[in-house]
Image: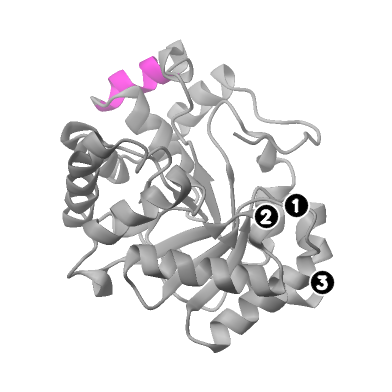
Amino acid sequence: MRTMPTLPDGTPIPPLGQGTWHMGENARARAAEVDALRLGLDLGMTLIDTAEMYGEGGAEEVVGEAIAGRRDGVFLVSKVYPHNASRRGAVAACERSLKRMRVETVDLYLLHWRGSVPLADTVEAFEALRRAGKIRHWGVSNCDVDDLEELGAALAECATDQVLYSLEHRGVEFDLLPFCAQRRMPVMAYSPVGQGGRMLRHKALAEVASRHGATPAQIAIAWTLRDGNVISIPKAADPAHVRANAAARDITLTKDDLVTLDAGFTPPVRKRGLAML
């Protein structure tokens, strides 16, 4: 098992969690989604990431059902729409999210991406929510180094930056990951196994997977966890997929593995624009 990374204030946070993007969009899939999240919790993936955007609140409702009766064992993350991230809007949005999830507090509340609302206004709302006990920590998502620098003194209170990060999207390694590591701020990686399966068919992943008796998706997840400052949040909605994701925590990649993956997926050598899905 991997050691748990910590937020800047020393709070431990699970290195591998569960994403919920596209959950809550189909009523017929709801029971399976709830069961998948509960299984993930049973397997130790106790961080659940969601957002008011996912299924327009539907994913938060799924999460609420999944964590009923076991809230104390869950690290709960949700995100606010940019257009709701004003001083009053973020407070109201958070209260709606809490109601949907049937909880009193969110462990980590994130700005989903930057919009027209000034960051200072969003931070003011987040701090008000924290003082009121509605959230324990706040952070951002899909923000680059210049966005984080714009936070100024408030950067010391920013707990994380959740970004697209996988073998096929490595641009954040050039400057964002080092910037966050210097500040002991973990990064959360969404879509760590890519989208559509193209990345998982790459021969470099297949080669490393064969060395470990693992699947390419498990290697892709293990790769995001390799340095201890990244929290990976793959999504799974069926039991076999959930179990496979959980098992990725136990894979330790060797230097040769990393060389093979670097040859197949070139690390960045210059600044790239922040990729988003």
How far, Cα to Cα, is label 2 from label 3?
19 Å
Q: Decide: marks 1, 2 in contact (CB < 8 A)? A: yes
Q: Position of residue 222 (x, y in %)?
A: 39, 39
- Residue 115 got which mark? 1
- Residue 82 got which mark? 2
Q: Position of residue 59 (x, y in %)?
A: 37, 49
Q: Earlier in the sequence, mark 1 or mark 2?
A: 2
Which residue is pictured at 35% across the width and 59% down the height?
Answer: 47
In the image, taking residue 106 as reference, residue 240 lies left or right, namely left
| Residue stretch in magenta | 205-212
Q: Nearer the viewer, residue 152 or 125?
A: 125
Most common SS among magenta residues: helix
Q: Position of residue 268 (x, y in %)?
A: 71, 31
Count neighbours of disc 1 (C-alpha within 10 A) and say few if under 14, some if 14 to 19, many if 20 or more.
Answer: few
Q: Decide: marks 1, 3 in contact (CB < 8 A)? A: no
How far, Cα to Cα, is label 1 from label 3?
18 Å
Amino acid at dot 3: Gly
Dot 3 falls on a residue whose secondary structure is helix
Q: Nearer the viewer, residue 5 or 17?
A: 17
| 1 vs 3, front mark | 1
Amino acid at dot 1: Gly
> Residue 15: in sight, yes or no?
no
Q: Which residue is mark 3?
A: 152
Q: Nearer the viewer, residue 156 or 91?
A: 91
- Look at the image and say whether residue 210 sits in the magenta stretch: yes
Amino acid at dot 2: Pro
Which residue is pictured at 51% across the width and 24% down the height?
Answer: 261
Dot 1 falls on a residue whose secondary structure is loop
Count neighbours of disc 2 (C-alpha within 10 A) and say few if under 14, some if 14 to 19, many if 20 or more.
Answer: some
Q: Earlier in the sequence, mark 1 or mark 3?
A: 1
In the image, taking residue 172 as reference, residue 252 lies left or right, namely left
Q: Position of residue 264 (x, y in %)?
A: 55, 17
